[in-house]
Amino acid sequence: VYDGANGVAGNASSTLTRVETSASTADLRANAVGGVGGTRISTTGTAAAGGTADSTINLNNSAGASEARVDADGGRGGYGGNSLIIGANGGAGGAADGIAVSTSSAAVTAGSYSAYSYSDIRGGQGGYSYGLTSAGAGGDATGSASSFSTNVGATRTVTSDSNVYGGHGGAIYAGVAGSVSGAGGDAVSSSSSHGDGEQSISTHDYAVGGSGGDVAGGVGVSGSGGSGGNADSTADAVRTNAVGTHGVTANATATGGAGGDGRGAGEVGGVGGAATG
């Protein structure tokens, strides 16, 4: 759009729920992608935000193995202005959320089955801006993966794997004094694996805050790169059957987003994001 009202990017949602009673393997996959925010070619206003994305699976297989995988990607924020028409702010990236729950409740003691869950969740990137004071922030992202095996005689693995990334902040080009590029989105991830049998239990969790946007050119006084997004990661792995001798492992990794660069005289870099876990 030029000087009129912005359009609205579409949100996306994908949800699957199933209780399986006959298949030896049940495998569900859900994917959601938010729409891209529209560009604003104007000397005023803010470009459209990216659409949100939400993806959820809840699967229980009483006859065999269970696998649940979710993906969600927030939409990119719209761009603000261009090299000829400057002034509009960039739009914010869309948030993304995902939940994967996988349960194998098969009562068979021989030939027992695995449980696996996976999530890949990514906040949308903030839109860049030409010649104004702010670019779009990256979208926040939240995700989890949980796997359960309820058979006390089970010998197959229980695994959860969650990967969550905050969206990167938008950059500013040819900014003005006081310009601040978009902040990176926060990332919050959690993973949990629980088994009642004799099997190995494995949990992997990874969260990365989005990088702050860079600020470049035209400021010369007090422009700043965007702050990096925060990251939080938690993981747990539990086996309740004391007879089991296989490994039980849980790994959680959180990495705060890098602050955006200040690429000119008088410009400063953004602060990096915090990491907890």
Image: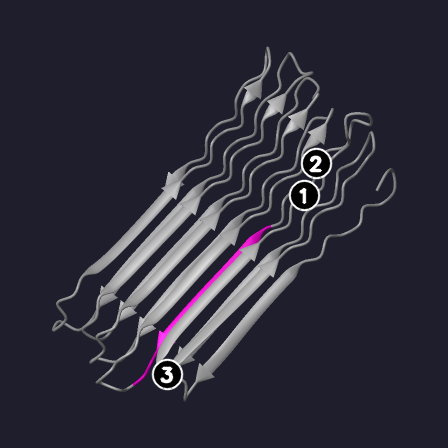
Q: Main secondary structure of the magenta part?
A: strand
What kind of element bears circle 3? Answer: loop
| Callout 1–callout 2 Cβ contact below 8 Å | yes
Quadrant occupied by the N terminus = top right
**Mark earlier in primary sequence (2, 3):** 3
Please say if 87 is above or below 219: below
Q: Residue at x 32, y 49 (%)?
A: 252
Q: Which residue is mark 3?
A: 24
What amino acid is found at the position of numbered circle 1 in the picture? Gly
Query: Can residue 22 be seen by looking at this rendering?
Result: yes
Q: Residue at x 21, y 61 (%)?
A: 248
| Callout 2–callout 3 Cβ contact below 8 Å | no
What amino acid is found at the position of numbered circle 2 in the picture? Gly
* Coordinates of residue 233 in the picture (x, y in percent): 37, 49
Q: Quadrant of residue 136?
A: top right
* Coordinates of residue 181 in the picture (x, y in percent): 62, 29
What amino acid is found at the position of numbered circle 3 in the picture? Ser
Q: CA distance from mark 1 to mark 2?
A: 7 Å
Local packing at callout 3 (Cα closer than 10 Å; few below 14, some 14-19, many 20+) is some
Q: Which residue is mark 2?
A: 90
Q: Quadrant of residue 238?
A: bottom left
